[in-house]
Image (cartoon, grey):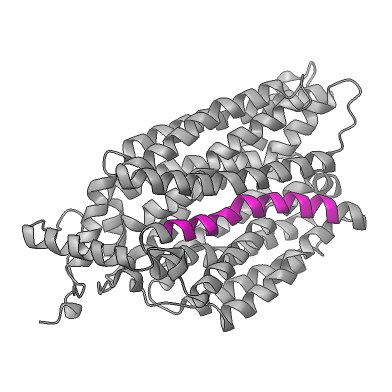
């Protein structure tokens, strides 16, 4: 019987482990190790595809954080407080996470090229037209539409890389792809502050990424490669129903625990990227003789975010690849160590902002560097503990959970806590908050991120107890339907 015609039972609870399956798994792993084991064997078309995905990821995150770079101007023009300012990011992330499962389902079954091109076109157009709106409600609505467009891309892009490469090369390509997240975030601050200041209007900063988005759509349609699902692993596992996909993911301990841990990462990065420049600006403003403008703080914060990503993402991938060969539990342990190192660095940065000029920036750099170790490793783990025809659904599920309980609410939650603390810290509720009260309220509100980082680190450590077993189950499922030569 042709093994391609077999639809295996891929439930983690029902996979049968036997000697024949172990032998098939070993042969499959040996065969995969010979395929693209070196970057020199990667074709030009594959390099172009990864470069296009990385480019779109870069402008994707530029677009998300451009507003954070001009947040003071946005608050002034719309006459809003911290709560509504944080809600602008929340409405974006809520739309993003709610539509991710839809695109995940489509991405496992239909043309990924068409889905991605349509999504990038949508968020580019809505970002551009939204920049001309002058009332807060309409502007917030268009930020939600941007989130819908970006959901189509983020759920699918990592699965294309997974279907092109295996092993160390996949890890390196994912590192290149996720390298664009902190770099794009940093560029978002820089573009927002520099372009807005140069042209005298913060809205011009929002009109930069749509131009690059149009280029990205053309590249996706005419240049990007869209491989068959599971091609790199020679997998012939057929898709199952959406209900079965979700049931299998929920029963997958490594996937669920790493998703919970990554939710903590999303919570922290969402809060820090949105409010980080603001709290440092307020703290520095309390120091005598300080002349730091908000634009300068945003520019510096953006540069720190970018450099920490340029170093942290490849460092995580390099450490992960080296240690994983010797120790199968290395990936979740590295992620946990990164969060547990980042927490005290961020706490010290918040504590020292009021009294020191450069120490907060240095500590934020250390904290972000440690967080950025996670990006490529978490993506790699999420792919290799899930079978190929289920990976877009898994990415979408992880996006939904991590954003629903992570950065969808953290900017807004921090803003609301800050507003509540202002009334508590002010001598009289009828007074306007002083600069000191504004800083102290936001500082106290942001301390919650440090506790969440510790929680995320603990969940990553627990993941290490299951990661080897769950990866082996996926290898066996693939081996059962692969042509082993």
Q: What is the tally of numbered marks visible in this picture?
A: 0
Q: Is residue 368 magenta?
A: no
Using the image as rendered, state which of residue 294 and residue 187 is in the foreground: 187
x then y, percent, for residue 373: 51, 43
Considering only vertical position in the picture, is 310 above or below 109? above
Q: Specify whether 151 is left or right of 76.
A: left
Considering only vertical position in the picture, is 419 above or below 143? above
Task: Say which quadrant the C terminus sits in.
Answer: bottom left
- In the picture, residue 369 is in which quadrant? top right
Identify which residue is drawn at 25% across, 67% down. Answer: 31
Magenta residues (range): 170-195
Using the image as rendered, state which of residue 113 and residue 484 is in the foreground: 484
Using the image as rendered, state which of residue 416 and residue 393 is in the foreground: 393
Identify which residue is drawn at 42% across, 77% down. Answer: 227
Considering only vertical position in the picture, is 99 above or below 231? above
x then y, percent, for residue 196: 86, 54
- In the picture, residue 465 is in which quadrant? top left
Q: Is residue 171 magenta?
A: yes
Most frequent secondary structure within the magenta stretch: helix
């Amino acid at each position: 019987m042709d093994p391609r015609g077999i639809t295996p039972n891929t439930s983690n609870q029902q996979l049968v482990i036997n000697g024949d399956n172990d032998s098939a798994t070993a042969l499959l792993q040996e065969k995969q190790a010979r395929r693209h084991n070196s970057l020199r064997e990667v074709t030009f078309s594959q390099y172009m595809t990864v470069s296009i995905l990385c480019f779109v990821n870069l402008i994707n995150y530029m677009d998300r954080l451009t507003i954070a770079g001009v947040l003071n101007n946005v608050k002034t023009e719309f006459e809003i407080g911290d709560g509504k300012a944080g809600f602008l990011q929340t409405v974006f992330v809520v739309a993003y996470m709610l539509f991710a499962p839809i695109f995940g389902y489509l991405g496992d079954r239909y043309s990924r090229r068409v889905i991605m091109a349509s999504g990038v076109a949508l968020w580019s157009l809505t970002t551009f037209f939204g920049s001309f709106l002058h009332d807060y409600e309409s502007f917030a609505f268009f930020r939600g539409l941007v989130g819908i467009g970006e959901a189509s891309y983020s759920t699918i892009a990592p699965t294309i890389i997974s279907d092109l490469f295996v092993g160390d090369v996949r890890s390196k390509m994912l590192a290149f792809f996720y390298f664009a997240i902190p770099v794009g975030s940093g560029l978002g601050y820089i573009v927002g502050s520099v372009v807005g200041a140069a042209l005298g209007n913060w809205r011009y900063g929002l009109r930069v990424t749509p131009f690059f988005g149009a280029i990205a759509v053309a590249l996706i349609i005419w240049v990007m490669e869209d491989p068959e699902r599971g091609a790199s692993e020679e997998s012939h596992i057929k898709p199952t129903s959406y209900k079965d996909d979700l049931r299998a993911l929920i029963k997958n301990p490594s996937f669920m625990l790493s998703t919970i841990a990554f939710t903590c990462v999303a919570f922290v990065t969402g809060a820090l990227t949105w409010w980080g420049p603001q709290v440092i600006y307020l703290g520095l403003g309390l120091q005598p003789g300080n002349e730091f403008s908000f634009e300068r703080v945003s520019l510096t914060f953006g540069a720190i975010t970018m450099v920490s990503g340029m170093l942290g993402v490849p460092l995580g991938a390099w450490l992960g690849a080296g240690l994983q060969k010797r120790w199968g539990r290395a990936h979740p342990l590295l992620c946990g160590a990164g969060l547990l190192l980042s927490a005290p660095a961020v706490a010290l940065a918040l504590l020292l902002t009021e009294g020191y000029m450069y120490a907060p920036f240095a500590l934020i750099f250390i904290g972000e560097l440690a967080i950025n170790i996670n990006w490529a490793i978490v993506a790699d783990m999420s792919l290799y503990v899930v079978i190929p025809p289920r990976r877009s659904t898994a990415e979408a599920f992880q996006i939904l959970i991590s954003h629903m309980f992570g950065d969808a609410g953290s900017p807004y939650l921090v803003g609301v806590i800050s507003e509540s603390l202002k009334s508590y810290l002010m001598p009289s509720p009828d007074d306007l908050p002083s600069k000191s009260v504004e800083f102290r309220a936001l500082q106290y509100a942001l301390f919650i991120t440090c506790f969440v980082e510790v929680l995320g680190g603990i969940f990553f450590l627990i993941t290490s107890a299951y990661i080897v077993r769950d990866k082996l189950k996926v290898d066996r499922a693939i081996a059962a339907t692969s042509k082993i030569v």
